[in-house]
Image (tube, rainbow, N blue to C red):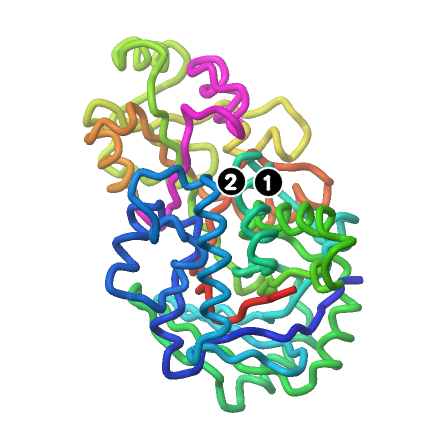
Amino acid sequence: MAILHPFKAVRPVPEKAEEIACVPYDVINSSEARSLAEGKALSFLHVIRPEIDLPEGLDEHDDQVYAKGASNLKAYVQSPFSISEDSPSVYVYRLIMDGRSQTGIFGCVSVDDYNNDVILKHELTRPVKEDDRTRHIVEQSAHAEPIMLTFKDDPVVTDIIETTISEGALYDLTASDGVQHTIWKVQDTLALVNAFKAVANLYVADGHHRCKAASRAAEQLKNSVSDEVHFFPAVLFPMGDMAILSYNRIIRRLPGTAASFLAGLQNRFKIHEVDNPVPQKKGDICLYLEGKWYGLALPESADTDVVGSLDIGLLTSAILDPMLNITDPRRDPNIDFVGGIRGTQELERLVDNGMAELAISMYPTSIQELVDVSDAGLLMPPKSTWFEPKLRSGLLVHLF
């Protein structure tokens, strides 16, 4: 039984929603955030990426950054540009990207459900990111951004969604990337809360670090703030609406020369140059080094568990560990991750500019693989899934 918890949202006045709403914190770096927020005093990036309001070059984990995020959120809540709801509500949130619609429920979910595996995880998290998001939550006394969950399609929930979207919307805006974001307030909140009592499990799609941070913050603050700290905001989408893109890898430095690494690949795999750097089927990967793309098929796993048979797991056992000495992708600074929405051109740019020596283009994980891993109580390596379209931050904020 999943708990859906209505909450008193802080949200923009409708005429400022487009100025305030922004991309999630984890799809851009600090430099990109500064650029996006330039000349936009109301952008919610000032809350979720507060280092942009401090001297460039300051460590984004400096004490000043967390203090600035808290003061920026407080200023927003007290400004004439926000509305603080008087009563708890839940909402319907629809995204439309390239003609494809994805519609879910925006409400709070329970930390206890997360801790007790009603909300199932599928990815390992990186401790440094957990620490960062936990501190932001604690210092802001808020969950500033929602996470994305998915659940097995439910006809009762679908009926409530259809009824709700036939009414007038609170917000209807199109972001700079062309994605349309529309939000409605649900009128029959109790019916929706009761409908989710029949949903056995929720699955984390996007936001593993924010989930873990919410859990840690609730434990840290359990005796000092309101019970609202035990709930955190999420948008819950039916699985039939979801789409997963690839989540690609870059390697900062090779252990030897590019030539020796390529020779090692040729000794282990059938490798060939390719014109199309996007893998076309499960088990295939493409690698970019020294201006050329190469394709190869990962070896089939003898492992019977679902994680061992994932492309991400096969990559680790066949290449990352034996050839690149990356045994723990969660903590190794030599590996980084690039969302598939950025395309293979971004991988080429990072290598050509010297920011990495190797890029790896992956085939996307499937929704069924996500469910299989989660149901088995197992975890994928970090950054195994990239969901699009992304939610907009700043539209509905949860304070505690």
Please count the marks in the image: 2
Residue at image coords 53%, 61%: 144
- Residue corresponding to mark 2: 384
Quarter of the image with the C terminus in it: bottom right
Residue 164: % across, % down: 58, 85
Judge by depth and name the residue closer to the eye, 261 or 353.
353
* Three-letter amino acid code at the position of disc 2: Ser
* Three-letter amino acid code at the position of disc 1: Glu
Q: CA distance from mark 2 to mark 1?
A: 7 Å
Q: Quadrant of residue 378?
A: top right
Residue 294: % across, % down: 29, 26
Residue 238 shows in the view: no
Task: Assess whether mark 1 and mark 2 are in contact (beta carbons under 8 angstroms).
Answer: yes
Task: Single out the residue that lies furthest toward the bottom.
Answer: 167
Task: Give the structural element (helix, strand or loop) at label 1.
Answer: loop
Residue 296: % across, % down: 37, 26
Residue at image coords 68%, 28%: 304
- Residue corresponding to mark 1: 123
Residue at image coords 62%, 22%: 302
Q: Is residue 328 above or below residue 20?
A: above
Residue at image coords 57%, 40%: 131
Judge by depth and name the residue closer to the eye, 132 or 153.
132
**In magenta segment, residue 106:** no
Q: Earlier in the sequence, mark 2 or mark 1?
A: 1
Q: Quadrant of residue 106?
A: bottom right
**Is 330 left, or right, of 87 in this rendering?**
left
**In magenta segment, residue 319:** yes
Which residues are drawn in magenta? 314-342
Task: Give the structural element (helix, strand or loop) at label 2.
Answer: loop
